[in-house]
Image: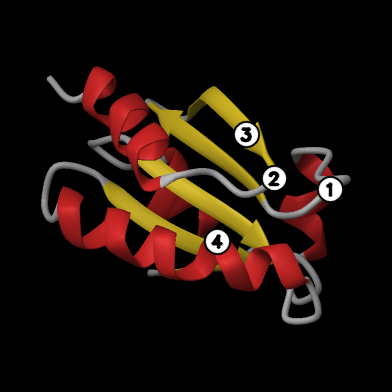
Amino acid sequence: MIVTDANFEKEVLQADKPVLVDFWAVWCGPCQMQDPIVEEVAKAMKDKAKVGKLNVDENPTTSQKYSIMSIPTLMIFKNGIVVKQFIGVQSKETLLGELNKLIN
């Protein structure tokens, strides 16, 4: 799922399940390493959680709101609140573990 300033409220804050958002940029090498891991997490979670990517260069409002200073930054939201934040490349196991803790 592509997350933008325009759809962030609906897709992330109003979601009825946990949402993992990957804040990234095209020019960011570690972000490119994180990308296939995020794809694997999305496939593994299927309908249990939402997984999205937000390009920080194209969506400055949301990036500033959440004080994104380093990328990749991954945030997990539940009920519109950030419940976990990671900076730097994270493993599939770490991300799945955190998401699974939040699934009812």
As drawn, 31 above or below 15: below
Q: Which residue is mark 3?
A: 86
Task: Give the spatial CA distance, label 2 vs label 3.
Answer: 7 Å
* Mark 2 surroundings: few (<14), some (14-19) or many (≥20) residues within 10 A: some
Name the residue rendered at 23%, 37% in the picture. Answer: 16
Which of the marked residues, 2 or 1, is nearer the chain's N terminus?
Answer: 1
- Give the residue type that dot 2 points to: Gly
Q: Earlier in the sequence, mark 3 or mark 4?
A: 4
What kind of residue is marked 4? Gln
Decide which of tag 1 and tag 4 comes sooner along the chain.
Answer: 4
Q: Amino acid at mark 3?
A: Phe
Q: CA distance from mark 3 to mark 4?
A: 12 Å
Q: Are marks 2 and 1 in contact (CB under 8 Å)?
A: yes
Q: Which mark is residue 35?
A: none
In the rendering, at what x and y percent does residue 25 appear?
73, 72
User: Label 1's element?
Assistant: loop
Left or right: residue 45 compared with residue 14: left
Q: Is residue 97 left or right of residue 86?
A: left
Mark 1–mark 4 contact, CB under 8 Å? Answer: no
Tell me which numbered mark, 3 or 1, is placed earlier along the sequence: 1
C-alpha span from label 2 to label 4 = 8 Å
The residue beneath circle 4 is 34
